Image (tube, rainbow, N blue to C red):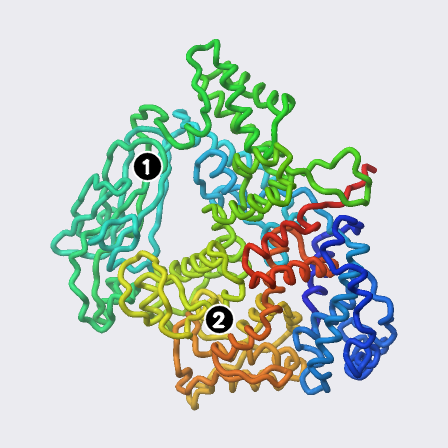
């Protein structure tokens, strides 16, 4: 079984991630000193020296004849531990993770193994302090999420980047890996089109042609109660959308409704919470339901982002049919006819078209952000344009701008001004700014005195960008830029103050919605397709609630600065009525999420959250293998190797025989010796979560049999159920914190963590231990490290 380090190195080679070695004298503080290392005991394993321990427990498989997993320990020199040793990092990971020696083989005493690993780490860290290595930092294109957030913070304008730009490739679990953020002709075309549309909407270009936007409502959306906090109490169903109105004018709203109502039911249309119309509808009927189930309204709307709410008045009597209201797909006309489900009106989609009779760009947040001045006459226009473009360029380029930066923008403005008015010329210059390489790429300036191949500390301005894209997935704000421009950001006290300020800023929610969403696979919730016949209470309200719960939980843990170990044990979570119903928590009403104290330990920490339990399941059943693999890879840092080719699927139950439990079928699967070694580690971890079904609901029976959630690790440790698993993880808290730190460092650096980064990771973890592994301690440790604050000078040749 290859370690995560081997996987990272292979993936790095496959994607062209070339890493330069360098020496950083300033990084000596990141690892134990040579003096400390020299005091390490010559016999770290007590009665068993390192060579004897390897010979007795490891060399039988890992030798130059067998070359198991590419690891040969029979001839390796234990008297000289080189800096950044890839081989020894493999050994440390395997022994610390308890995966080696494998199950059934003799194991060294725990104190001997722990002493050996501690000695190895001390020697490697001391060598790395004398000869540390830095990974190469490449030019970093903004990924789609960063682009969207940068537009938001630059122009006070929210866009849907997914509708404008293609998705980004991912590696090492994240989509912000610099080496994968390439540029293609198609992507350049997408950037040009996006810049044109964004600049026109931000400025309020009245030359925009009439357009429309359609907002569909999922058929699996439950619409028997209030569906959004943006809709009033007493409302039922519908949707609330945020639509950007480019300028003042008249707009047409078309609401398509399904279902049949007699008598007619009114549908309300609201703008920013204010009711503007109440239109009667009887729903779809006849040969052309799309038209006959639609109502239209044409009204004037002011420019800017507006919340459009469409809903019914809640006059529905509780269903007394076979299928209650929690089965949205059971409320269709066909299903109701066949099963007795209750049918009611639902909103299918909302169209917004216009503007008609445009009256001007209006007063929008984006116009207030763009137009730092308004010229009183033609003579002052050029000076005002210079002020506007200089301010925008400073924020977009994340640094003070020079005349050479502003002149191309001014030239674009002056050319456009010949054929249009002042606002139109600013729009064209803004469009030019949004495709400038200094906006789309994070370009770090190398000092003239830097020596090729040698490390140097990045400038305060580049450090500010590294911080903002790490903590906010966006550009620096004015305060961070001001501190960086003054040259004070690199001062330790100022740096710490800025990091803590940024952590409590609302923009740090990106650590939950971007970092954690990728680390924990939350993005997979959106595309998950549970079998609705196997799980009839599944709907899109529950889908949305699963992701929201975990993101709110992660955000609260970070913002309240808990120890990261509490991610696994916290006795609270965030639920709305739909999710509380799923979890069996009484007394929760409405669509608003609120923090609740958990009545027992079933839902404690991340392991009790249905989002994670669902994305580690098959559509129609649980998967102990997927769950075990997820635990090994994301929480314990010891991912199994890829499965061998042509692995057969798990055997299905015979409908004519007594159904077998998932455990019995997995035992048949493990009969294959090729599969057994890895499954012996994965499966017991996965079985401990069998009390949760494939959409995360609690159960005590599966396939007609009582759930058996017991298991044991290769070292003989036994446990039972999710609570037993939590105790296992609590006892291996340092492994979890180390894995968490590796994931966060990967995300922070935008590159894969390599074997020579392990001394830095150990330094961060040990430094955070005194502060109970709080988020702030780990984030400060990462951002203070040479890997984050330094880079290796490139050669000019």
Left/right of residue 218 with respect to residue 75 in the rendered view: left
Number of labels in the image equals: 2
Q: Position of residue 229 (x, y in %)?
A: 30, 51
Callout 2 environment at 10 Å: few (<14), some (14 to 19), or many (20+)? many
Callout 1 environment at 10 Å: few (<14), some (14 to 19), or many (20+)? some
Q: Residue at x 39, y 29 (%)?
A: 209
Q: Position of residue 137 (x, y in %)?
A: 70, 46
Q: Which mark is residue 617?
A: 2
Q: Residue at x 45, y 40 (%)?
A: 159
Left/right of residue 743 with respect to residue 14 in the rendered view: left
Q: Position of residue 107 (x, y in %)?
A: 72, 84
Q: Residue at x 73, y 61 (%)?
A: 755
Mark before the other along the chain sequence, 2 or 1 = 1
Helix, strand or loop status at disc 1: strand
Which residue, given by chain and number where applicable, does mark 1 sit on? 353
Quadrant of res 63: bottom right
């Amino acid at each position: 079984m290859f370690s995560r380090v081997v996987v990272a190195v292979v993936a790095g080679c496959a994607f062209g991630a070339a890493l330069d070695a360098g020496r950083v004298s300033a990084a000596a503080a990141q690892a134990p000193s040579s003096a400390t290392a020299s005091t390490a005991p010559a016999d770290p394993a007590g009665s068993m020296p390192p060579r004897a321990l390897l010979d007795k427990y490891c060399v039988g498989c890992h030798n130059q004849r067998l070359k198991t997993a590419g690891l040969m320990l029979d001839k390796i020199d234990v008297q000289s531990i080189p800096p950044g040793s890839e081989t020894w990092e493999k050994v440390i990971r395997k022994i610390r993770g308890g995966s080696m020696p494998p199950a059934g083989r003799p194991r060294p005493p725990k104190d001997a193994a722990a002493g050996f690993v501690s000695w190895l780490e001390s020697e490697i860290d001391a060598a790395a302090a004398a000869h540390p290595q830095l990974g190469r930092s490449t030019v970093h294109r903004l990924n789609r999420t960063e682009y969207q957030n940068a537009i938001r913070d630059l122009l006070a304008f929210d866009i849907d980047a997914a509708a404008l730009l293609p998705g980004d490739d991912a590696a090492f679990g994240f989509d912000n890996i610099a080496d994968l953020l390439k540029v293609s002709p198609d992507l350049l075309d997408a950037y040009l089109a996006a810049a044109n549309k964004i600049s026109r909407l931000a400025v309020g270009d009245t030359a925009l042609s009439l357009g429309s936007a359609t907002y569909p409502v999922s058929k699996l959306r439950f619409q028997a109660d209030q569906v959004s906090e943006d809709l009033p109490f007493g409302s039922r169903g519908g949707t609330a959308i945020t639509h950007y109105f480019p300028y003042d004018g008249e707009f047409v709203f078309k609401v398509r409704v399904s279902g049949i109502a007699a008598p007619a039911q009114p549908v309300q249309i609201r703008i920013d919470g204010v009711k503007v119309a109440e239109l009667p509808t009887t729903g779809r009927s006849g040969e052309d339901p799309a038209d006959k189930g639609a109502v239209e309204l044409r009204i004037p709307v002011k420019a800017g982002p507006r919340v459009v709410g469409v809903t019914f008045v809640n006059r529905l009597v509780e269903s007394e049919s076979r299928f209650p209201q929690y089965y949205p797909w059971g409320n269709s006309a066909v299903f109701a006819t066949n099963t007795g489900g209750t049918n009611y009106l639902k909103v299918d989609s909302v169209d917004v078209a216009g503007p008609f009779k445009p009256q001007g760009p209006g007063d929008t947040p984006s116009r207030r952000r763009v137009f730092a001045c308004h010229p009183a006459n033609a003579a002052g226009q050029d000076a005002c344009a210079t002020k506007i473009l200089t301010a925008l360029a400073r924020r977009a380029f994340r640094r003070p701008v020079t005349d050479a930066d502003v002149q191309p923008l001014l030239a674009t403005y002056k050319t456009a001004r010949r054929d249009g008015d002042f606002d139109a010329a600013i729009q064209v210059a803004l469009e030019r700014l949004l495709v400038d390489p200094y906006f789309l790429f994070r370009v770090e300036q190398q000092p003239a005195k830097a020596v090729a191949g040698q490390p140097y500390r990045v400038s305060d301005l580049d450090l500010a960008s590294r911080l903002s894209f790490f903590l906010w997935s966006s550009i620096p704000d004015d305060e961070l830029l001001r501190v960086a421009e003054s040259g004070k950001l690199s001062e330790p006290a100022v740096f710490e103050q800025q990091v803590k300020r940024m952590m409590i800023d609302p923009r740090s929610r990106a650590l939950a919605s971007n970092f954690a969403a990728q680390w924990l696979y939350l993005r997979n919730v959106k595309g998950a397709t549970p079998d609705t016949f196997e799980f009839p209470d599944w709907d899109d309200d529950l889908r949305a609630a699963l992701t929201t719960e975990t993101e709110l939980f992660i955000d609260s843990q970070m913002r309240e600065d808990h120890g990261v170990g509490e991610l696994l044990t916290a006795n609270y979570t965030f639920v709305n009525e739909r999710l509380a119903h799923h979890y069996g928590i009484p007394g929760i009403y409405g669509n608003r999420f609120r923090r609740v104290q958990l009545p027992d330990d079933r839902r404690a920490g991340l392991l009790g959250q249905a989002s994670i339990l669902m994305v580690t399941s098959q559509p129609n059943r649980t998967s102990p293998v997927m769950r075990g693999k997820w635990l090994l890879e994301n929480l314990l840092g010891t991912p199994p190797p890829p499965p061998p080719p042509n692995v057969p699927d798990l055997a299905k139950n015979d409908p004519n025989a007594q159904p077998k439990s998932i455990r019995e079928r997995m035992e048949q699967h493990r009969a294959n010796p090729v599969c057994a070694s890895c499954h012996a580690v994965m499966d017991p971890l996965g079985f401990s979560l069998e009390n949760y079904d494939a959409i995360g609901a609690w159960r005590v029976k599966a396939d007609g049999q009582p759930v058996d959630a017991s298991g044991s690790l290769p070292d003989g440790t036994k446990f039972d159920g999710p609570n037993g698993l939590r105790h296992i993880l609590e006892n291996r808290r340092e492994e979890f914190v180390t894995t968490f730190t590796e994931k966060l460092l990967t995300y922070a650096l935008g590159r894969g963590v390599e074997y020579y980064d392990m001394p830095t990771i150990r330094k961060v973890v040990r430094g955070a231990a005194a502060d109970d592994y709080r988020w702030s301690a780990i984030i400060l440790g990462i951002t203070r490290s040479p890997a984050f604050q330094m880079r290796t000078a490139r050669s000019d040749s």
